[in-house]
Amino acid sequence: MKTLFVKTQDVARNWYVVDAEGMILGKLATKVATLLRGKHKPEFAPNQEIGDYVIVINADKVRVTGNKPMQKMYYHHSGYPGALRSRSFEQMMGHKPTYPVEHAIRGMLPKNRLGRKLFTNVKVYAGPDHPHAAQQPEVLSIP
């Protein structure tokens, strides 16, 4: 059987809207990362960008289970000695509610230039409104 190579410009790329309200953070991120990579398509190739565009709305209403709201930490270091900063999930949702969703999705993409390019295909919004109505995105329900 021959390997199928598809040109990136020949692939049909759809736009999807995912409502994150009440969803668990990890389950949302895995589904979005799969759509971004294009693993749901039969012409998937790990070295090509053939995935879809994803719009995540209501990112401020995503949830985590157990004690993670207090115990899950996000770290940032400026590079200077003693400059490690940390925030819990609760604090981060109050400060920048889209960050936990973006961070989880970015962590599930490849750690190379393809992964950085794929991350530009996801748009995360804290509220229910988004400016991408012209792309006519399909509503995708994740169980």
Image (tube, rainbow, N blue to C red):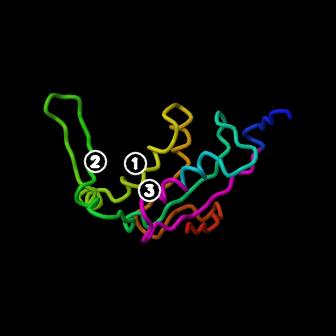
Q: Is residue 2 above or below residue 69?
A: above
Depth order, front residue of 12/69: 69
Check disc 1 and give the amino acid type.
His
Crowd class of label 2 (few under 14; some 14 to 19; many from 20; radius 10 Å):
some
Task: Tell me how far mark 1 sits from mark 2, CA to CA.
Answer: 9 Å
* Nearest to viewer (mark 2 / mark 3): 3
Q: Which mark, residue 103? A: 1
Which image quarter is the N terminus in? top right
Q: Which residues are magenta?
A: 11-31
**Quadrant hosting residue 26:** bottom left
- Are discs 1 and 2 less than 8 Å apart at CB? yes
Task: Tell me how far mark 2 sits from mark 3, CA to CA.
Answer: 15 Å
Marked residue nearer the N-terminal end (2 or 3): 3
Residue 117 percent location from the top left of the image: 55, 38
Marked residue nearer the N-terminal end (1 or 2): 2
Q: Residue at x 26, y 57 (%)?
A: 95
Q: Which mark, residue 19? A: none
Q: Residue furthest left?
A: 82
Q: Which residue is mark 3?
A: 26
Marked residue nearer the N-terminal end (1 or 3): 3
Crowd class of label 3 (few under 14; some 14 to 19; many from 20; radius 10 Å):
some
Tag 1 secondary structure: helix
Q: Residue at x 22, y 59 (%)?
A: 70
Q: Which residue is mark 2?
A: 74
Tag 3 secondary structure: helix
Depth order, front residue of 33/93: 33
Residue 88 percent location from the top left of the image: 24, 54
Q: Is residue 64 above or below residue 76?
A: below
Which image quarter is the C terminus in? bottom right
- Are discs 1 and 3 less than 8 Å apart at CB? no
Residue 105 percent location from the top left of the image: 47, 49
